[in-house]
Structures are given as structure tokens and as C-alpha cells.
Amino acid sequence: MTVDKHPQRDAEKLKAEIKRLKEERGAVILGHYYTEGDVQEIADFIGDSLALAQVAKKLEAPVVVMCGVHFMGETVKILCPEKTVLVPDLEAGCSLADSCPADEFEAFIKEHPGHTVISYVNTTARVKALTDIVVTSSNAKKVVDSLPQDEKIIFGPDRNLGDYINRCTGREMVVWNGACHVHEQFSVEKLVELKKQHPQAKVLAHPECKKPILLLADKVGSTAALLNYAKESDAKEFIVVTESGILHQMRKDCPEKVFIPAPPEDSTCACNNCSYMKLNTLEKIRDCLRDLKPQIEVDADIIDRARKPIERMLELSK
Ligand code: 13P
Ligand code: SF4
């Protein structure tokens, strides 16, 4: 086995190769805030899942590398079927999307006739094809508010986000029982302890967290909303209750402020990682640009059906 004696130099070499290959391929690299810092640094655009979908729709590049998870690559492919959509690692899935198999969701919809189906973007293309309107954590409330108060709604798959939107809007949406293994892991006891140690700190939480966590938060929002809150707030300290990748951008944008990751329940680790997001490495980005694979493939009829609810979301988010 060769021992890597110069990780920094190797990273710089990989970044130079990525830059060269990207130009050769006419490619654009999109990255989610949960990826590693060095991946965020080489991305042409980083954002939350709504922003990534909005950017994808406007891209002219023939090749897009989606550094995130599989459903994010599918969203790009659905919006831009003519493009080559690469993901550095096809194994980068999402436990929340996995918690909602399309055939079971279809049966659930049939059990609730007359309901409008709202699905979180963290779903497979097949689930989106069964959906009336897609939402992200950025726009879920806005989309739900746009519907008549008496409209019957199914919300899937995240039970925490669905329950949170029910609380915010006074609705009684029927919520699918799915969750993200990363966000459900945060410990209320450890958060309470951190708040005692940092009484001035504001608590920033993603709505995929459980209700007791959200009740302790000063701001609940998407990754982009939490970042903006941190930038605009007068506070100097923040406890961040979401995947730890977002800390990179928070620390970069607000070097004078202190960001403290909230810890998960069953670990000695100080922060909480999405192992799927961390599958995006510089090496794999270089390889996918070099080999033009792995590519995201979605059946044409699924693309047709899944595009409408995503377009509807983009329309409602303007
Ligand atoms: P955002 O919509 O906030 O980017 O979140 C995506 C996600 O996967 C959260 O776990
Ligand atoms: Fe999916 Fe959770 Fe990872 Fe987000 S953090 S991509 S919801 S597994």
C-alpha cells in the first residue's frame, strides 16, 4: 500500500485535473452544502436542494456533475434530460428517499382518494412521478399555503418536516412515516447541555429533526436558510443541528462567528455526518469527468411524469 505523504499536494493536483477535465468536457459542477469542504471549494455552484434545482434548469453546459446524493442527480436529469448528468458515486443514496418505496407510496395514495400529493424533493424519480407538487425544505410552507385551506393533502416522505408544516400552517396533512437517519439522530439531552454551556448561542435546526429539537431552535430552515440566518444575525455563537458539511460555508462566510455542531445520540463524535454525502471525493469527481460515468439514467416516461410536479414547485417558488 502506498502511503500518502502529501495529502495537500495531492488534493491540489486533483483540483487542477478536475479543472482541466471540466473545461474539456464543457461541464459544470454542482455541490450540496453537506459535501466535504474541498468538494464545495471546486464546485461552480453550491446550494440547498431548491437552489441546485433552480440552477440546473438554467444551465447551458452539456455535462453536469452533481456532487450530492442520487435523488439530486435525478432531479437534474428530469429537468435537463438532454444533458449528461454525472454523479461521482452511484452509491450516494438517501435514507429518507429509501424510506418511501414507490409501490408502497402508490398504495398509500390509493388509500386516500381525493388528496393532493406533495412530496419532498428527497424522493426517487418514481415517487415524484406519483406526485402533484414537489417541495424542498425551503419552500414547503409556501407551497402548502398556496393551496386552499380545505384541500386534502398527503405529504411524504418526511414525518418530521410534514408534522412541522402541519404545526406552522394549522393543516392536517396525512403524513408518510419516513425519516432521515442523520437528522433523527440528534440528541435532545446533549443539545440542552450545549445550550447551558453556550447560553448566548442561537440554535439553528433543519426541519428534518424531531419535534423536541425543533422546539429548542431559534431558527428552523433549509441549509440555505440556516446559513442566511447566521450571516444576518447579530449573534456571535450558533449551535448547528444539521449535517456538519454546512459548517464549512458558515465558517467561511462568517469567520468572526463561532459555529458549534450539535452531537448525535449514540456516538462519541461531536458532529453528525451523512455518509452518503461524504462519498463525493475529489478523486471520484476527477474519474467521473474523465470517464463520463457513472451517469444518471431515468426512464423517459418517468421523466415526463416527474417533471410536472418539479416545474410546479419551481413556478410556485418564484
Ligand atoms: P436542503 O433542502 O436544506 O438542502 O436539505 C437537503 C437534505 O438532504 C437535508 O437532509
Ligand atoms: Fe438524505 Fe439525510 Fe443524507 Fe439529507 S442528510 S441526503 S435526508 S440521508
Image (tube, helix red, strand yellow):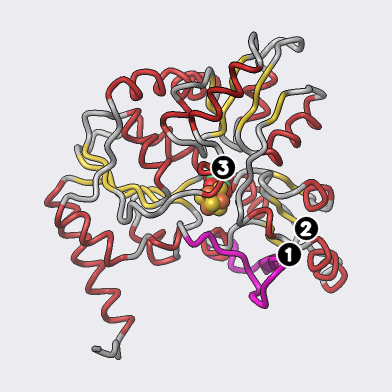
- Gap in Å between the C-alphas at discs 2 and 3? 31 Å
Reply yes or no: does residue 262 show up in magenta: yes
Foreground pick, 242 / 301:
301
Q: Position of residue 246 (x, y in %)?
A: 55, 58
Q: Earlier in the sequence, mark 1 or mark 2?
A: 2
3 and 1 marks in contact (CB < 8 Å): no
Which residue lies at the image location 32% right of the left edge and 56% below the top edge? 89
- The front one of 21 and 88 is 88
Residue span colored magenta: 252-275
The residue that appears at 48% across and 24% down in the rendered structure is: 314
The residue that mark 2 highlights is 202
Q: Amino acid type of disc 3?
A: Ser
First in sequence, mark 3 or 1: give its number.
3
Q: Nearer the viewer, mark 3 or mark 1?
A: 3
Q: Position of residue 88 (x, y in %)?
A: 30, 55
For disc 1, the neighbor class at 10 Å (few under 14, some 14 to 19, many from 20) is some
- Disc on the earlier residue, 2 or 3: 3
> How far is disc 3 from disc 1 in space, using C-alphas?
37 Å
Q: Is mark 2 in CB contact (under 8 Å) with mark 3? A: no
